[in-house]
């Protein structure tokens, strides 16, 4: 790690918005939303297979696209932390060891989940799909739990330390700008998906994003909604929605 430099004063009061509005925290919220969606997908497929209906080729294609975008976004989030955020933060405080070590465990589970879902979605045999679904869900439960734990560690330990030791301008110049330049359209879409239009506008104002850049980012979000999220939601979460509707009727 880089040599640490003690700041002259606590910078926490210089941050004009709450921790929950920070882009780092919002990235975690986006990943949590994707994890919840994947949990619903696995449950939906379970109900569908139990009813004697195989996962279709169309469903497999929609599911694969969403999983691919999720894993790419999560990989990118980790690289941003490892290559940009953590080295810079380490110039002023020691990064908790469990945060540094967490990414290796997560990457291993992500690879297992990726491989397991690829096998599941490549199969056309309902009996094989049922067995592979159980395996994929077992890995997913571990992945989701470790993600949630890792996100909490960063939010409860690393983020408050960041705000104590750095000003918003320092983080914006040395971390946020670099991360934004490294994001592709699907990453922007995944990041913005859980936010309402009002929340997206507020976040853009908070970060000082110029209007023409906002327009580009919001177009990426709309494209992601249209091409990735909505087809996935329509085809891969249907069984869960139908079951919920039936429960409400009774």
Image (cartoon, rainbow, N blue to C red):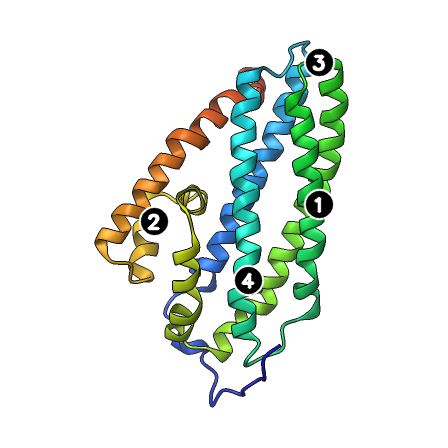
Using a 10 Å C-alpha cutoff, classify the residue at mark 2 as few (fewer than 14 neighbours), some (14 to 19) or many (20 or more): some
Using a 10 Å C-alpha cutoff, classify the residue at mark 4 as few (fewer than 14 neighbours), some (14 to 19) or many (20 or more): some
Foreground pick, 201 / 111: 111
Foreground pick, 175 / 191: 175
Instruction: State the separation of the CA atoms marked 1 and 2.
Output: 31 Å
Residue at 40%, 57% (x, y): give it: 180
Instruction: State the separation of the CA atoms marked 2 and 4.
Output: 23 Å
Residue at 64%, 57% (x, y): give it: 150
**Which residue has dot 2 on it?**
200
Q: What element carries label 2?
A: helix
Disc on the earlier residue, 3 or 1? 1
Disc on the earlier residue, 2 or 4? 4
- Give the left or right position of residue 46, taking residue 92 as reference: right
For the view shown, which residue lies furthest in the left direction?
A: 211
Instruction: State the separation of the CA atoms marked 1 and 4.
Output: 18 Å
Q: What element carries label 4?
A: helix
**Which residue has dot 4 on it?**
81
**Which residue has dot 3 on it?**
126
Foreground pick, 45 / 2: 2
Which quadrant of the figure contains the N terminus?
A: bottom right
- Give the left or right position of residue 183, taking residue 130 as reference: left
Residue 226 x %, y %: 38, 30
**Which residue has dot 1 on it?**
109
Q: Do the residues labelled 3 and 4 touch (CB within 8 Å)?
A: no
């Amino acid at each position: 790690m880089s040599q640490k430099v003690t700041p002259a004063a606590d910078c926490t009061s210089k941050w004009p918005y709450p921790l929950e509005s920070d882009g780092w925290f919002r990235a975690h919220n986006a990943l949590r939303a994707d994890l919840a969606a994947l949990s619903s997908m696995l449950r939906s497929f379970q109900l569908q297979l139990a009813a004697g209906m195989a996962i279709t080729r169309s469903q497999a294609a929609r599911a694969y696209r969403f999983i691919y975008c999720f894993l790419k976004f999560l990989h990118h989030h980790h690289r941003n932390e490892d290559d940009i955020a953590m080295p810079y933060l380490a110039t002023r405080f020691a990064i908790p060891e469990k945060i540094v070590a967490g990414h290796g465990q997560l990457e291993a589970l992500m690879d297992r989940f990726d491989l397991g879902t690829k096998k599941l979605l490549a199969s056309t045999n309902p009996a094989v799909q049922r067995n592979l679904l159980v395996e994929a869900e077992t890995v997913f439960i571990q992945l989701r739990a470790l993600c949630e734990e890792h996100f909490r560690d960063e939010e409860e330990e690393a983020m408050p330390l960041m705000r104590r030791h750095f000003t918003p301008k320092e983080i914006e110049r040395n971390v946020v700008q670099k991360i934004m330049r490294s994001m592709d359209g699907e990453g922007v879409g995944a990041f913005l998906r859980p936010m309402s239009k009002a929340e997206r506008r507020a976040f853009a104002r908070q970060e000082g994003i110029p209007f023409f850049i906002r327009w580009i980012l919001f177009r990426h979000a709309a494209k992601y909604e249209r091409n990735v999220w909505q087809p996935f939601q329509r085809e891969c979460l249907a069984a869960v929605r139908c079951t919920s509707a039936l429960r409400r009727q009774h």
